[in-house]
Image: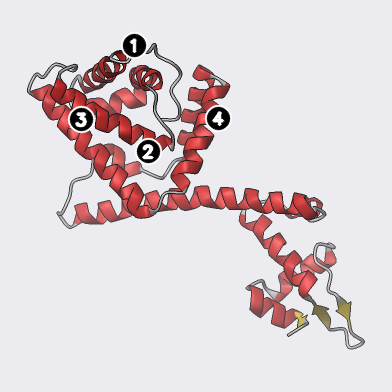
């Protein structure tokens, strides 16, 4: 079909006839032609324009601002679509976390698992994540901003099984380190260092690039500097935040590196 009436376009796009009439009235989406019988007809160009309008609406852009964005052409239009994709990808990642939270909650309600208190709220607060990233950037500067963006893109490229495998690895390493602390093992002993090597490899996988000894030492300092990290590790075990940071620093010292600003942890 080369042309669509208002009713046909409404059925195709899911937009109401009344909305299409409103878009016509405000000049946002004019039909390709209006026949003598008063029927509006929309062609390929109008269908694509409507798609762009709906993209903007999905992202919460006011109608008054959409008209200005629709004049973009060529590379500018492509770049705008890429920005849409990046924002939707970020939402997809967050929704994936929410799905995991729901699954864990169902498991707890069925008596199959007990959730950590912090896990009850995973995925609910992008504002908190934004505030946390702002804290990192303020503390460590532009280098941290670049690191956060790189880490975010790398994580978005991971498949769901890969993300689940990383979560399992972190849980296993942290529990093993907590057991080492309970047994009174020195943070710098060989057994603990083997676990710390796994932890450093996990950090590198999350960052999407190598975790240098100096960056790893800086990350240890970050774990002690931010109250959210301290609270998280203290839930694993009393004094565990200090124990983990000490083990990380002892590992980094073997390479003779001074701490540097960590990337997004």
Closest to the camera, between mark 4 and mark 2, is 2
Q: Label 3's element?
A: helix
**Residue at image coords 38%, 20%:** 222
Cα distance in 3D space between marks 4 and 2: 17 Å
Q: Residue furthest left?
A: 183
Which disc, if any, is residue 205? 2
Quick check: 155 left or right of 169? right
- If you read the primary sequence from the N terminus, does the residue marked by circle 1 or circle 3 appear first? 3
Of label 1 and label 2, which has the lower sequence position? 2
Question: Mark 1 highlights which residue?
Answer: 256
Depth check, mark 3 against mark 4: the one in front is 4
Seen at 62% across and 52% down, the residue is 84
User: 10 Å neighbourhood of mark 1: few (<14), some, or many (≥20)?
Assistant: few
Rendered location of residue 70, percent (x, y): 79, 56
Report the Cα–Cα distance between label 1 and label 3. 30 Å
Residue 2 lies in quadrant: bottom right
Q: Which residue is tagged 3? A: 236
Residue 146, which numbered label? 4
**In this view, the mark in front (1 or 2):** 1
The CA span between labels 3 and 4 is 31 Å
Q: Nearer the viewer, residue 141 or 132?
A: 141
| Residue 214: % across, % down | 39, 18
- Residue 43 horizontal/vertical position (percent): 79, 76
Mark 1 in CB contact with mark 3 (< 8 angstroms) = no
Q: CA distance from mark 1 to mark 2?
A: 23 Å
Quadrant in which the C terminus appears: top left
Badge 3 or badge 4: first in the primary sequence: 4
Find numbered disc 4 in the image and state the secondary structure of the residue it sits on.
helix
């Amino acid at each position: 079909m080369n042309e669509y009436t208002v009713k046909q376009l409404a059925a195709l796009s899911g937009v109401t006839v009344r909305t299409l009439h409103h878009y016509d009235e405000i000049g946002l989406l004019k039909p390709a032609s209006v026949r003598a019988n008063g029927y509006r007809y929309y062609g390929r160009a109008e269908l694509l324009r409507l798609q762009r309008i709906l993209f903007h609406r999905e992202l919460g852009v006011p109608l008054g601002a959409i008209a200005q964005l629709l004049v973009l052409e060529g590379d500018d239009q492509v770049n705008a679509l890429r920005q849409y994709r990046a924002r939707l990808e970020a939402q997809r990642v967050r929704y994936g976390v929410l799905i995991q939270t729901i699954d864990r909650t169902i498991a707890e309600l069925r008596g199959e698992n007990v959730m950590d208190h912090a896990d009850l709220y995973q995925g609910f607060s992008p504002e908190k994540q934004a505030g946390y990233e702002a804290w990192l950037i303020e503390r460590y500067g532009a280098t941290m901003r670049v690191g956060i963006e790189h880490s975010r893109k790398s994580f978005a490229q991971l498949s769901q099984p890969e993300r689940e495998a990383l979560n399992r690895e972190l849980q296993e390493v942290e529990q093993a380190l907590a057991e080492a602390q309970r047994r009174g093992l020195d943070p710098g002993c060989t057994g603990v260092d083997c676990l710390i090597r796994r932890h450093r490899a996990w950090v590198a996988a999350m960052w999407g690039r190598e975790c240098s000894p100096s960056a790893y030492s800086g990350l240890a300092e970050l774990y002690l500097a931010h109250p959210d990290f301290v609270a998280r590790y203290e839930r694993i075990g009393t004094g565990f935040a200090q124990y983990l940071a000490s083990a990380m620093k002892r590992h980094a010292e073997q390479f003779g590196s001074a701490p540097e600003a960590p990337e997004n942890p």
